Image (cartoon, helix red, strand yellow):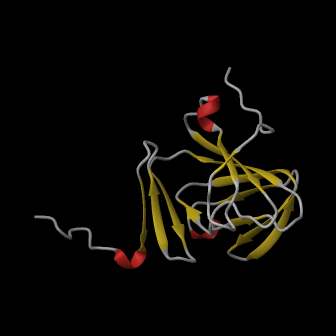
Amino acid sequence: MNRFNVNAPVEYDPEPEGYRAGYAKLHPEIGARTLFGGLFELPPGQSGRPYHYESAEEWLLVLEGRVSVRHPEGEDELQSGDLVSFPAGPAGAHKLTNRSDANARVLLISTRTSPAVAAYPDSDKIGVIAEWGERIFVRRESAVDYYDGER
């Protein structure tokens, strides 16, 4: 049996101010094949990711502290023990921000797809992230026709 403890330390990447969150991938640690899992630690004033929606359903469980969740209908504050679901597509857009004065920890679980697709409404970008490490983020305005460049 593979195991991951959600109280384990997380790694912090040098993200830009406002997005300095700790993160750990759960699914490889427990051998998950059909689900993706991420543990985020959000210090005060920081967000996990920009406002976005994905090509898969995602669940959020607040493990510790409080987080504000921006979503298409507004913003709500969640506290330890709260569980919510974000549907795939625009109706599931969300951004997590810690507006409290203490660290918060959240667990995000989604249907595992590769490549994963995410859209970022505020910056009008689309991202494609492949399990094997390739990633691309483009602005919608750079779109080309399906047959562009084909012979």
Question: With 58 as the anchor, is 97 left or right in this view?
Answer: right
Q: Nearer the viewer, residue 19 or 107?
A: 19
**Residue found at x 63% / y 69%:** 51
Question: With 42 as the anchor, is 113 left or right in this view?
Answer: left
- Vertical placement of 61 versus 27: above or below? below
Residue farthest toward the left in the current orientation of the protein: 151
Question: With 75 as the anchor, is 26 left or right in this view?
Answer: left
Where's the N terminus, which quadrant?
Answer: top right
Q: Position of residue 83 (x, y in %)?
A: 80, 53
Q: Position of residue 113 (x, y in %)?
A: 50, 47
**Residue found at x 26% / y 73%:** 145
- Vertical placement of 99 versus 35: above or below? below
Q: Nearer the viewer, residue 40 or 108?
A: 40
Where's the C terminus, which quadrant?
Answer: bottom left
Q: Quadrant of residue 49?
A: bottom right
Q: Quadrant of residue 27?
A: top right
Question: With 129 as the anchor, is 2 left or right in this view?
Answer: right
Q: Position of residue 38 (x, y in %)?
A: 66, 46
Q: Nearer the viewer, residue 28 or 145?
A: 28
- Number of on-image labels: 0
**Residue found at x 64% / y 30%:** 30
Residue farthest toward the top in the current orientation of the protein: 1
Q: Position of residue 98 (x, y in %)?
A: 80, 64
Q: Quadrant of residue 136?
A: bottom left
Residue farthest toward the front in the current orientation of the protein: 14
